[in-house]
Amino acid sequence: MKTRALGRGTKSYRWQVLRPRAATATGDQRINSFGIGGDIEIRAGSFVVKQPIDAPVVHFGLGDRSRCDVIRVVWPNGGSQVEFRKPTDTLVQADQRLKGSCPFLFTWNGERFVFVADFMWSSPLGMYINGQEKGAVAQTSEWIRIRGDQLVAKDGHYEVRINANLWETHFFDHLALHVVDHPLGMEMYCDERLALEPFSPSFRLMETPRPVAKATDHNGQDATEVVRAVDGVYLDRAGRGRYQGITRDHWVEVDLGDDAPKTGPVWLIAHGWVHPTDSSINFALEQGTSERPRSLSLEVPDGQGGWKPAYTRIGFPAGKNKTVLIALDDLGGVIRRFRLRTNMEIYWDSLQYAKGSAVDFRMNELTLVSADLRFRGILAMSQANPSSPELPDYDRIVGSGQRWRDLIGYHTSFGDIRELIANVDDRYAILTAGDDVALRFAAPPNPPAGWKRDFVWVSDGWVKDGDLNTRHGKTVLPLPWHGMPSYDSPPSRLQDDPVYKRFKKDWDVFHTRYVTPSQFERGLRQP
């Protein structure tokens, strides 16, 4: 008979068991099921301990401490979240929040700064575009429409704010504001899409848009009222797929109606937003067999009861609150019945059409009076419902610490940056999360009687997110430049970088703020 000794302690020590899980919502799966590859850090009073997530259950000994005060989880894609005073034996799930989405544009509307859109979607560095093609960044320029009611002069100037809020470094090469004065009864729209095939940014003047006569979803259900107007009610009937940003094949069938113009130019004005994939999802798609995202295509009846593609690779709305313009008369007569098809998470707010106009207009670039880079902090983000985009609030600051594992390297020092953003010349301002640019433009005289004023926001530059599967996503280097064939070369020393060699003085005058993720990595430990 064998004897087995069993040691028993006399102390009633306590413990915390954590069971990290990916969000269970369909259409997430940005991380593996148990968060393997991430880490968890806990704090109980002055006691702090950190462990890697290498199993479905992570065990922490607490001694005589009754519970954890704070738990911080860093998921394997680099996203982080903090939980407070969770009970023992706790299930912790990943928040389904965006960690990257380009800089935010705010304007003074006479009462407060309102969110207009995010921008610089066309130039992500180090990631696969749409999960299928390497981003050589052939297009760096974008135009964004600002309605006249969104930007009101204050003391003879137009006030604009640019906020860096997410896990990204931004390279602003050129920022400008143009006024477009035009007759009443006309509307101005920019084509605000991201396409794998570069196109020249533009705007169009059109007659007053009209809602489509009928819209039907891919299930044959009526959607006419949902897409009638820009009202924050989004067409969301495709469900969620396995990965964030990709869902099942879906479309919206559109009939302009009998009273639509029979001759062009006629434009479809499709307004909505896209829930994007990210580098980690794109990397998973690159390695696996799942279906890749398919950009929008416009299909027309084939005369045999089916459909055939008329336009393919249209692209998709480049972020939040974006308009896609599609010419409906390029194939001869006006296309009056068609459908927009994709498998991406695209949510349409409105589908309208309008006849193009060749009326007179006046477009002028405004004088930039000041551009002050300063630190503001992390803005609150909120989502009205699962069909709506996650939007920032300029007046609500939720943190001044380092929320993300910021990219390592020299960023632009706080102060005047007008010289850096004046021209497209590879001399740029470099911003990280929490940074804010206050811009003031001289307001010209009001338009003449019978005219109205809208605006075009012009940007040129690059965005680089810190996702752990973004190429060179931990550092500011290598520095981007116009005409670079790819972004595959690993970073070298700053002194050997081609952009640094061309503009060495800028690193003596402007780019003197060295950023590291030290505060983030310190985690729950005391400074």
Image (cartoon, rainbow, N blue to C red):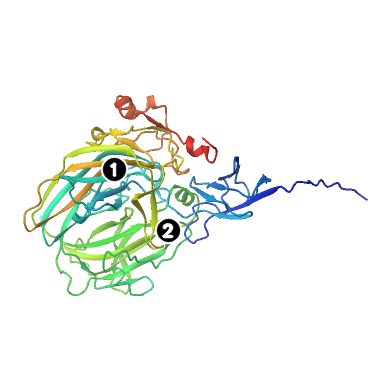
Question: Left or right: 20 with respect to 163?
Answer: right
List the single residue furthest toward the left: 449
Nearest the camera: 459 or 249?
A: 459
Residue 431 appears in the rendering: yes
What's the residue at 61%, 43% (across, down)? 51
What secondary structure is found at the residue carrying circle 1?
loop
List the single residue furthest toward the right: 1
Q: Amino acid at mark 2?
A: Ile
Nearest the camera: 396 or 59?
A: 396
Is residue 479 placed above or below 348 in the rendered structure? above
Tag 2 residue: 246
Q: Earlier in the sequence, mark 1 or mark 2?
A: 1
Q: Which mark is residue 259?
A: none
Q: Quadrant of residue 458?
A: top left
Q: Which mark is residue 140?
A: 1
Question: Left or right: 286 with respect to 89?
Answer: left
Residue 484 appears in the rendering: no
Residue 179 in the image: x percent, y percent? 15, 48
What secondary structure is found at the residue carrying circle 2?
strand
- The answer for how far apart the CA atoms under marks 1 and 2 are is 25 Å
Is residue 227 placed above or below 449 in the rendered structure? below
Instruction: Determine whether label 1 and label 2 are within 8 Å by CB.
Output: no
Number of dots carrying numbers: 2
Residue 225 in the image: x percent, y percent? 29, 72
Q: Amino acid at mark 1?
A: Thr
Q: Quadrant of residue 378?
A: top left
Residue 123 in the image: x percent, y percent? 33, 44
Residue 457 in the image: x percent, y percent? 23, 47
The crowding category of the residue bearing disc 2, from other C-alpha atoms within 10 Å (few below 14, some 14 to 19, many at least 20), is many
Is residue 515 placed above or below 312 in the rendered structure? above
What's the residue at 75%, 46% (across, down)? 11
